[in-house]
Image (spheres, helix red, strand yellow):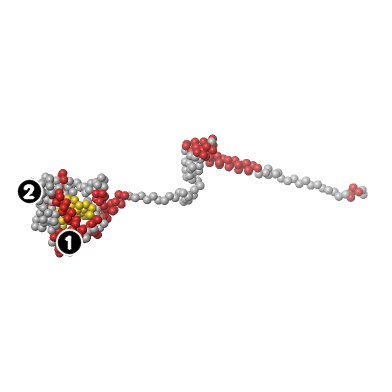
Amino acid sequence: MSDDSQQPIVVKKIKKAGAAGHGGAWKIAYADFVTAMMAFFLLMWLLGSTAKGDLKGIADFFQTPLLVAMAGGSGSGDSSSVIQGGGEDLTRAHGQVKKGDIEAPKKTINLQALKADFEKKEKERLMGLKSDIEAMIEASPTLKQFKKQLLLDITSEGLRIQIVDEQNRPMFDSASSELKPYTKLILREIGPMLNKVENRISLSGHTDATPYAGGDRGFGNWELSTNRSNASRREMVAGGLDGSKVMRVTGFASTVLFDKTQPQSPINRRISIIVLNKRTEEAILDDGKEEKVAEVTDAQQLDARGVLPPAAVPAAAPAVPVAR
């Protein structure tokens, strides 16, 4: 047998594999396309919800970005949202508060309400003082007999205490500013009571319509009424009233009659003490620039309150030679 028959037989098998998967390049291209489309639609939405002024600012930025960035204004990043006028801030979660958004609550003060509340409380204090004085009069056997001569009421000026004259019990001697002993007693008892409140007081003297002997050219009812109110002030201070609380001492002569129907009645001869409220104090200090002191509309009430203007008072009775 020849040598060729002894050589091994080599069989070559060719194994064919399946077709290749063509790679993943198409996926990357598709992802880029979707991303670009999403960016495009997002840009369209943002531009559609942006005001014209902001669009102009954006356009200016792309044309001259350095100029807009240096000058500021719309389009340069001064908005709290993504683009000014673009609606809610898409970066903010519900309930989230950004730094700088919290402002201290502003307190609003209603001055009218505060003033009304203050005046209400002040009136309550004056009413309490009125009750204390009335209780003092009832408890004092000495003052109780003069009860009819002490008239207390609340007016627009404050608490008014009037000490009136009676036919059989005059407060002063005729044509004199000398206080009667019982008048001194009344004033000395009332004086310390007024220290209970911080309000200041006003004193005014009044005469009846009987003219003073000698007429108005010399010493008359004006001087007499002023002297009587000043004498009352001195007596109240002597009884314990704080002298610094006295704000005004005036005389009205017969211009403000208590009994308008009887100008010469003894009840018109009186001393009026007013515990002033703050509104009246301020009006006095302002010298009537802001408001008229104790202005009321009812003429009859004006007579009783002691603030009737002289021009509104009826003419005085015919002159008689004796003053009261």
In the displayed image of the protein, which residue is found farthest to the front? 218
Q: Left of 115 or right of it: where is 173? A: left
Q: Left of 148 or right of it: where is 279? A: right
What residue is rendered at 73% in x and 46% in y? 17
Secondary structure beneath label 2: loop
Q: Along the line of sight, which residue is nearer the eye, 201 or 233?
A: 233
Q: Left of 261 or right of it: where is 38? A: right
What residue is rendered at 20% in x and 60% in y? 239
**Nearer the observer, disc 2 or disc 1?**
2
Res. 166 image quadrant: bottom left
Disc 2 crowd rating (10 Å Cα; few below 14, some 14-19, many 20+) is few
Quick one: label 2 or label 1, which is nearer the N terminus?
Answer: 1
Residue 184 percent location from the top left of the image: 16, 59
What residue is rendered at 54% in x and 35% in y? 63
Q: Which mark is residue 320?
A: 2
Determine whether label 2 and label 1 are within 8 Å by CB. no
Residue picked out by circle 1: 137
Q: Along the line of sight, which residue is nearer the eye, 210 or 145?
A: 210
Q: CA distance from mark 2 to mark 1?
A: 37 Å
Is residue 200 among what the camera can see? yes
What residue is rendered at 9% in x and 51% in y? 323
